[in-house]
Amino acid sequence: MTWLAVLLLGVACTDLAHSLLQRHVLPQLAGALAAVLVGLVSGMTGARDVGALVVIVALVLAWGFSVSRGFAAGGRAWVPLAVLGGSVGAAVVAAPLAPELASDGLLGRWLDAVPWPSLPGAEPSRVLMVGALALVQLSTGNVVVRLVLAATGTVLPAQHGTAGDPETRLKGGRLLGPMERLVILGLGLAGELTAAGIVIAAKGLLRFPELQSKGEQERIHQLTEYFLVGSFVSWLVPLTSLVLLS
């Protein structure tokens, strides 16, 4: 679980940095650096862990560069999706080889010193995993959604931000998506998946007025496809996160 958590944290930091910096190289380097720093601070200093960190850095860089190319004009959006899926799959397969973080390590001691009642004595590896998955919901979820929309032809990367982009018509998606995913993840961790279902249903009701019109049926069909594909992919991100935590 430790290696997977560090990988996901590096991926999430890459996407967050890209959304803030809008640069081609710095986000990848920031994500790789974050993965290394968190790994070392968490106690990944053994020979096997250091080797895993090298692989993780390579995968984080591959993700960042493939996303940049996937969003470019004429890019292949399925490539970064394959990179992410393959990376997570490899980390899951290698999970039994990853040693659990020691409770007396730096992260474990910090958790014991935190005044919040639920954190002292918590398993450091699980806390690291929960933190990494929470970061994934913020920006990586949006990236995955847009890549799937581009890969399925629902929206073209070249239309991003233009009048032809459905996102400009369904306002707030890039902000509501992370909030919605965090709520679903939190409710799932609390064992309240039924409440998460209510959140999902509420989103459909709130968007319904924007998805109906007596005129412009072709535009409405495009918006409906965009909404359905994007929403289902967005919901799969926290649900998959809960599976990884189980």
Image: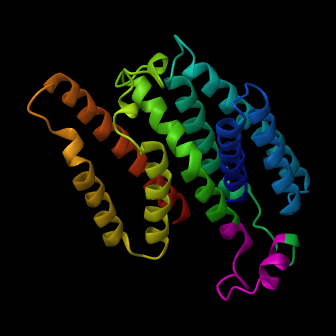
- Quadrant of the drawing holding the N terminus: bottom right
Q: Is residue 115 magenta?
A: yes
Nearer to me, 151 or 183: 183
Q: Position of residue 167 (x, y in %)?
A: 40, 33
Q: Nearer the viewer, residue 83 or 171?
A: 171
Residue 63 is situated, as x and y percent measured from the top left of the image, at 66, 32
Residue at x-position 86% and y-position 52%: 37
Residue 58 shows in this picture: no
Left or right: residue 14 compared with residue 184: right
Location of residue 71 (image quadrant): top right
Q: Which residues are magenta?
A: 107-127
| Total numbered labels placed on residues in the image | 0
- From the viewer's side, name the closer residue of 150 and 216: 216
Q: Is residue 72 left or right of residue 120?
A: left
> Toward which corner of the image does residue 163 lie, by quadrant?
top left
Q: Residue at x 38, y 24 (%)?
A: 155
Is 244 located above or below residue 232 in the figure?
A: below
